[in-house]
């Protein structure tokens, strides 16, 4: 339909050593009903092929000391590609000469997603002592979908002032296939992405080659990573001294200077260990400066008293007395203004 409607169809063809031949087609439709409006839609198939981790990983860690039991993550080359079919629709409009609005909606359907399935326990005698191993295997026993909305306005109220914003909503809904014994991947994946994100940016071009930028962002919680929702802001003041020289003063995380933005994912053995170490460090960090100073002073007094008692109880040896004598002898002797030459010293020694 002239320049108002266009259709693009393509595909990616991939062959790899893990899953063989893969086809990833896509179709995109673009419609411009007016010079100020654009509507687009797309359908895409994509895959995530297996990696060396799913194919060859062997990771063993302690599960219980009594009876001695280990779990072992095993890559046995039975994991196949994860599959996605994504649907997208978007709209962009020049509402006014200085105001743009972008809106996009998406729906993604996932199949054969990664799951970690426990296998049948078995016994090992090497290395000793004898122990039990619980294998954890990579399988494709999860499926689900994600839905979301993205809104991005762009407004220029003055030629020297620009305002940009963005809002995104994401909902993840995953399920296990019948027979799956995966106990953590669903919750750890669903709780590792924020449901809502908001960002606002303001840019001012001031006189005298000055710029002043401000940004605000809000992100909801990540329950699977033990990260709370946070809101913070950044500012930047910049001066273009020359074409190739800028001076900037930047302030970051002004509302919440100390806040986590990501963490370890629940259900990951390695991340659980890291989280435990981080928790221990955080508990130690909760000790106040007053307590630290009190402990430091107490240790200093203990060392001081111990050194005094040791000095009172110990008797100096013969060599310690001689060393002290020589040291003090040099301090209190008055030497002549004219030092002896090498010849005079030799004559004195020979005379003795």
Image (cartoon, helix red, strand yellow):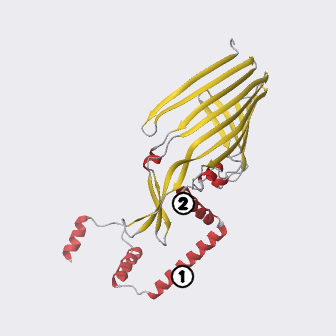
Residue at 68%, 27% in the rendered image = 41
On residue 75, the disc is none
Question: Residue 268: image x %, image y %?
Answer: 55, 55
Residue at 64%, 36% in the rendered image = 247
- The answer to which of marks 2 and 1 sits earlier in the sequence is 2
Residue that label 1 marks: 305
Q: Secondary structure at mark 1?
A: helix
State which quadrant residue 276 falls in.
bottom right
Q: Which residue is most to the front?
A: 178
State which quadrant residue 96 falls in.
top right
Q: Nearer the viewer, residue 245 or 288?
A: 288
Residue that label 2 marks: 273
User: Relative to 288, is 319 above or below?
Assistant: below
Give the distance between the C-alpha atoms of the residues marked 2 and 1, in whole angstroms.
41 Å
Q: Check disc 1: other Cα within 10 Å, few if <14, some if 14-19, many if 20+.
A: few
Q: Nearer the viewer, residue 37 or 45?
A: 45
Q: Quadrant for the N terminus, please.
A: top right
């Amino acid at each position: 339909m002239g320049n108002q409607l266009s259709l693009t169809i393509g595909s990616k063809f991939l062959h790899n050593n893990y899953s063989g031949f893969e086809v990833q087609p896509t179709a995109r439709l673009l419609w411009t009903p007016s010079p100020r409006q654009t509507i687009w839609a797309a359908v895409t198939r994509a895959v995530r092929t297996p990696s060396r981790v799913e194919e060859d990983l062997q990771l063993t860690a302690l599960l219980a000391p009594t009876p001695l039991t280990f779990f072992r993550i095993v890559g046995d080359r039975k994991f196949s590609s994860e599959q996605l079919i994504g649907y997208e629709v978007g709209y962009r409009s020049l509402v006014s000469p200085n105001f743009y609005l972008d809106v996009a909606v998406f729906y993604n359907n996932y199949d054969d997603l990664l799951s970690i399935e426990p296998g049948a326990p078995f016994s090992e005698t090497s290395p000793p002592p004898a122990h039990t191993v619980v294998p954890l295997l990579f399988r494709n026993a999860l499926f689900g979908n994600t839905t979301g909305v993205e809104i991005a306005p762009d407004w220029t109220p003055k030629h020297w002032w620009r305002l940009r914003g963005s809002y995104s909503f994401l909902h993840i809904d995953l399920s296990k296939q019948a027979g799956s014994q995966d106990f953590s991947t669903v919750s750890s994946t669903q709780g590792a992405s924020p449901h809502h994100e908001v960002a606002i940016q303001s840019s001012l071009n001031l006189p005298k080659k000055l710029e002043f930028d401000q940004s605000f962002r809000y992100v909801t919680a990540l329950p699977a990573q033990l990260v709370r929702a946070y809101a913070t802001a950044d500012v930047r003041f910049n001066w273009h001294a020359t074409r190739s020289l800028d001076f900037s003063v930047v302030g970051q995380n002004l509302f919440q200077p100390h806040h986590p933005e990501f963490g370890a994912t629940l259900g990951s053995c390695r991340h659980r260990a890291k989280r435990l170490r981080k928790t221990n460090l955080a508990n130690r960090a909760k000790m106040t400066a007053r307590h630290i100073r009190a402990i430091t002073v107490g240790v200093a007094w203990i060392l001081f008293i111990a050194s005094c008692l040791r000095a009172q109880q110990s008797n100096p040896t013969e060599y310690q007395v001689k060393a002290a004598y020589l040291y003090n002898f040099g301090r209190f002797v008055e030497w002549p203004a004219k030092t002896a030459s090498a010849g005079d010293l030799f004559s004195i020694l020979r005379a003795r």
